[in-house]
Image (cartoon, rainbow, N blue to C red):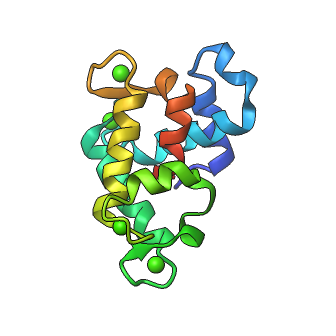
Amino acid sequence: MPKHPVSAILAVLALVPAPALVLPIASAHAANALTAADTDKDGTLDKAEIDAAAGTEFDKLDKDKDGSLDKAEVGKRLSKADFAAADTDNDKTLTKAEYTAAADNAFTAADADKDGTVDAKELHSKAGRALSKLIK
Ligand SMILES: [Ca+2]
Ligand SMILES: [Ca+2]
Ligand SMILES: [Ca+2]
Ligand SMILES: [Ca+2]
């Protein structure tokens, strides 16, 4: 039986330090992203999990199934500047490789203690929330 999504979020929120609860909406999203992407259930996200989650999210966002994301498909997940930075061949769309590379960069930025994983606390930071938008 899958857990009800809301109770799953509450279960994760119960495990994170109280200051993270100050921003309930952003935190719920980050917690949700952690739950969804943490396939080995160790409570942190490693690069392989980020790459897999970014790939899944890419497929979900690519509504017209043309293998790339235009600005409308990406929506608010990336700012204009971040979209331009991710679009390395400058063709105004993101391929899966470009999208995954952007998620990898966001992962590196969010991994504040540089231990190769992003934990719940790191995911609730500003960089962590930017990362969570790309994977969920
Ligand atoms: Ca994990
Ligand atoms: Ca598309
Ligand atoms: Ca491109
Ligand atoms: Ca870390």
In the image, taking residue 120 as reference, residue 114 lies left or right, namely left
Residue 90 x, y percent position in the rendering: 37, 65
Image label count: 0
The residue closer to the viewer here, 115 or 108, is 108
* Residue drawn at (67%, 14%) of the image: 18
Which quadrant of the figure shows ligand 4?
Answer: top left
* Residue drawn at (55%, 71%) of the image: 73
Residue 49 x, y percent position in the rendering: 31, 45
**Is 76 situated above or below 39?**
below
Residue 100 visible in the snapshot: yes
* Residue drawn at (28%, 61%) of the image: 97
* Residue drawn at (38%, 47%) of the image: 103
Residue 113 lies in quadrant: top left
Residue 44 visible in the snapshot: no
The residue closer to the viewer here, 15 or 101, is 101
Residue 1 x, y percent position in the rendering: 52, 55
In the image, taking residue 80 as reference, residue 99 lies left or right, namely left
The residue closer to the viewer here, 2 or 45, is 45
Residue 31 lies in quadrant: top right
**Is 46 situated above or below 5?**
above
Residue 121 x, y percent position in the rendering: 51, 21
**Is 89 situated above or below 21?**
below
